[in-house]
Structure formats: structure tokens, C-alpha cells
């Protein structure tokens, strides 16, 4: 194999590009991976070079060969003009929003958005004079009725955080672009492997690399990519904040990138199989998974997505809280934690009632969010079967 990267990576499939993107062994003395570059100070050979900032790097916040490897690989994968890295997924969202909105602007946010995003919008953007309005995630082209002359961006998330509504992103993008505004998307659930954001009309796409890019539940990272129109503003905003992730986390993300397609494929298959198994359970009222044929968002998912990840929701038939606690407390293989995307299976209870403002959350029973990991599916099902037995006994 050559030590130089492929000349035309676009002609290869996604899995091939994941293996080769962002790597240049010839620049690393033949070693396969770009090493970890730690540093703040960059030295210049001459006074003239210093005065004119000649050189690829001038300070640690402007990037390193390690960060360049990941940003170039991610831009290639997402079909973006450029990508910046941040210390978390939430930080990636804040940089995206701050790149577009200013005091006096109007921002539309899906009512199903990641709750920390709402907290930032209500706690910081409103304080700085941005008018934030939440909308029904199922609005589609009806977003036109909410657009104002001051609307600068619409934030979408598909499927919705916890509640898993599917948004018609292309329809929303067509309306938003006609009004001269930007579409910002949290694409963490699908990653660019399953939903190519910029090809679907998204101007700025946000991913929590903490999830499937990591795959190991051992790092915090955010990635924000932009098309050619919005890349200058995004890059400029990133430079103003200098919100840089740690070099070890970037290196781990690069390592996770190489196997992400394989892991995501397995998470998706395991997740769908588990969703189908749960649908048949007498304790379950419904399963919130867009890849299921009877899911309300299935048609949009089938049209716009090439697969599903391992994250979905379940609505139980009405039972007291003590029954849910009995079910979850005795699980052996499912951990209870707020992240997902790693190799391990997770479950958390959730309730959107307190913070939804544009829509009403009334599922009719307790809600659980599952992330299906890479364990044997039969073992996971046996663990849940025992949990359901505890739930029934506690009713």
C-alpha cells in the first residue's frame, strides 16, 4: 500500500473513506496514524516569518496535525467545506448558533431539541437579545408561517432527542433558504454515514463525537461542519472562542473513526431487532423508532436516511414509578447513564413534560430511552425479560 493518501477519495465507499480519510503516512515517517501533537507555542524560524505569520500553524489554538487529520476526514465524510472541533457536543452547538445569530435576530428551534441546547438558547441567547421560538418538529413546510424578517436560523434535529419525531429536513431547508436564513442540524443520532446533512440542505451540522465516533464512552468531543456559504462565519466564530478539545481526545476520535461504520451497522441491526422484540411485549404501549414500518416518521426516515443507530424510545403501559424502578435497578447488562453511542447498552427514564413549550408531551405511560450496545442480543433480551418480571411483580 502506498504511503500517500488516495488522490480521489470521492470514488470510494464510505467504509473505505473512513479508513483512509485524514491520514498521510508519508508525512509521519510511514507510521499509519497521525500522532498526538501537544503544544501551545509554535516557533518561527525568522523575524520576517513571525511578523507575517508564515507557516501552517502559529499557536496551539489554531490547530495541529492531529486536529487537521480529524477535521479534514470529517469534512470529507460530511460533504462539508470545513469542520471545527470543540470539547463537547453542546459546545459544538453553541459555536454553530453563535456563528449565525446576533442581538435582535429571531431563532426557531425544534421543540424536540436536545435539552441542553434549549438551556443554552433560553439562558444565554435570550440574555444577549436573540428571540428564541420553539416549533412543532412535525411542522415541515409549515415552518414558513413562523418565519420573520429577522429569522436568521432554524435548528432541526432528526429524530428528536428522546421523543424521536422525524423532521422533514429538505422541506424545511427549502423554505428557510428561500427566506435567506440558515438551517442548523444536530445530526448526532445518524452521523453523516446515515444522513448526509449538507446534501440534504443543512448549512451547519453538529455531531457529538462523544457518541458513535468515540464508540468507547471514554471521551468528550464535538464536531461542527459547514457548507461553503457558512464556513467563513463558523471558522471565524470558532477562532474568537478558541474552544479547543484536548489532543488525546482528538486522537481517540481518529482511532474510533476507522471502525465507526462497522460499529454503527451493528448498533443499528441490534437496535432494530430489540425494538421489534419490545414491540411484542405486553408491558409496552409503543416503541419510538423511525425504522419501524408503523412509526409515524418511517416514510421520511426511509426517504432520507440509509440506516438507523442503536438509540430509540419505549413507552410502557401505565405502571407506578416503583415498578419502573424495580425493573431498572435489577438490570445486569443495561447501565443507567446519560450518554450513548458506546459499546455498552444503556437505559434511562425520561419525561419531556416540563420543558416542551410548542407541543404537548403526553405519552400515556412511563418513557424509557434505550441504547443497544454490542452485547449478545439474547443476553440483553434475557436481562430485560427478568426486568419486566420485576416490573409486573411491583405493580
Image: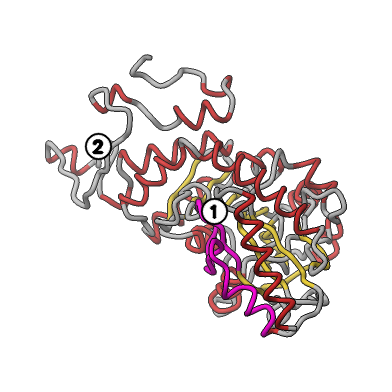
- Which dot marks residue 341? 1
Count of picture labels: 2
- Of 228 and 339, the residue lying toward us: 339
What residue appears at the point 65 percent right and 44 percent down from the top-left corner?
Answer: 197
- Of 153 and 39, the residue lying toward us: 39
Residue 153 position within the rendered picture, expressed as x and y whole percent measured from the top left? 67, 59
What residue appears at the point 67 percent right and 73 percent down from the top-left corner?
Answer: 132
SS class of the residue under badge 1? loop
* Quadrant of the rendered image containing residue 6: top left
- The residue where tag 2 is placed is 54
> Which range is magenta?
322-347
SS class of the residue under badge 2? loop
Assess whether residue 378 is covered by the magenta stretch.
no
Which residue occupies the extreme top position in the image? 1
Which of label 1 and label 2 is nearer to you?
A: 1
Residue 237 position within the rendered picture, expressed as x and y whole percent measured from the top left? 46, 57
Q: What secondary structure predominates along the stretch shown in magenta?
A: loop
Instruction: Residue 326: tell me if it is visible.
Output: yes
CA–CA distance between discs 1 and 2? 40 Å
1 and 2 marks in contact (CB < 8 Å): no
Left or right position of 100 against 249: right
Left or right position of 269 against 135: left
Identify the image quadrant of the C terminus. Answer: bottom right
Mark 1, Cα crowd under 10 Å, few <14 / some 14-19 / many 20+, is: many
Amino acid at each position: 500500500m502506498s504511503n500517500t493518501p488516495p488522490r480521489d477519495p470521492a470514488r470510494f465507499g464510505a467504509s473505505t473513506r473512513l479508513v483512509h480519510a485524514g491520514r498521510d503516512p508519508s508525512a509521519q515517517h510511514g507510521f499509519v496514524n497521525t500522532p498526538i501533537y501537544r503544544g501551545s507555542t509554535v516557533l518561527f524560524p525568522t523575524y520576517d516569518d513571525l511578523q507575517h505569520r508564515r507557516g501552517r500553524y502559529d499557536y496551539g489554538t489554531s490547530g495541529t496535525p492531529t486536529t487537521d487529520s480529524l477535521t479534514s476526514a470529517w469534512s470529507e465524510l460530511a460533504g462539508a467545506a470545513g469542520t471545527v472541533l470543540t470539547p463537547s457536543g453542546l459546545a459544538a452547538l453553541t459555536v454553530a448558533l453563535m456563528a449565525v445569530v446576533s442581538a435582535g435576530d429571531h431563532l426557531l428551534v425544534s421543540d424536540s431539541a436536545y435539552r441542553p441546547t434549549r438551556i443554552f438558547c433560553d439562558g444565554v441567547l435570550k440574555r444577549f437579545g436573540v428571540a428564541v421560538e420553539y416549533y412543532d418538529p412535525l411542522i415541515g413546510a409549515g415552518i414558513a408561517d413562523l418565519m420573520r424578517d429577522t429569522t436568521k436560523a432554524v435548528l432541526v434535529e432528526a429524530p428528536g432527542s428522546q421523543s424521536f419525531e422525524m423532521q422533514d429536513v429538505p422541506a424545511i431547508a427549502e423554505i428557510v433558504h428561500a427566506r435567506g436564513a440558515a438551517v442548523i442540524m444536530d445530526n448526532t443520532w445518524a452521523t453523516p454515514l446515515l444522513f448526509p446533512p449538507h446534501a440534504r440542505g443543512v448549512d451547519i451540522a453538529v455531531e457529538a463525537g462523544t457518541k458513535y465516533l468515540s464508540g468507547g464512552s471514554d471521551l468528550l468531543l464535538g464536531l461542527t461542519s459547514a457548507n461553503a456559504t457558512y464556513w467563513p462565519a463558523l471558522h471565524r466564530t470558532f477562532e474568537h472562542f478558541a474552544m479547543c478539545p484536548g489532543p488525546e481526545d482528538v486522537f481517540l476520535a481518529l482511532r474510533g473513526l476507522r471502525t465507526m461504520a462497522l460499529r454503527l451497522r451493528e448498533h443499528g441491526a441490534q437496535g432494530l431487532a430489540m425494538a421489534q422484540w419490545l414491540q411484542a411485549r405486553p408491558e409496552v404501549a409503543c416503541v419510538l423508532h423511525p425504522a419501524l414500518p408503523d412509526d409515524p416518521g418511517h416514510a421520511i426516515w426511509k426517504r432520507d436516511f440509509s440506516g438507523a443507530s442503536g438509540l430509540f424510545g419505549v413507552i410502557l403501559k401505565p405502571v407506578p414509578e416503583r415498578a419502573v424502578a424495580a425493573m431498572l435497578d435489577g438490570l445486569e447488562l443495561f447501565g443507567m447513564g446519560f450518554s450513548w453511542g458506546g459499546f455498552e447498552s444503556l437505559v434511562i427514564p425520561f419525561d419531556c413534560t416540563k420543558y416542551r413549550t410548542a407541543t404537548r408531551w403526553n405519552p400515556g405511560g412511563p418513557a424509557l430511552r434505550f441504547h443497544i450496545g454490542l452485547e449478545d442480543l439474547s443476553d440483553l433480551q434475557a436481562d430485560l425479560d427478568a426486568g419486566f418480571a420485576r416490573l409486573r411483580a411491583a405493580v
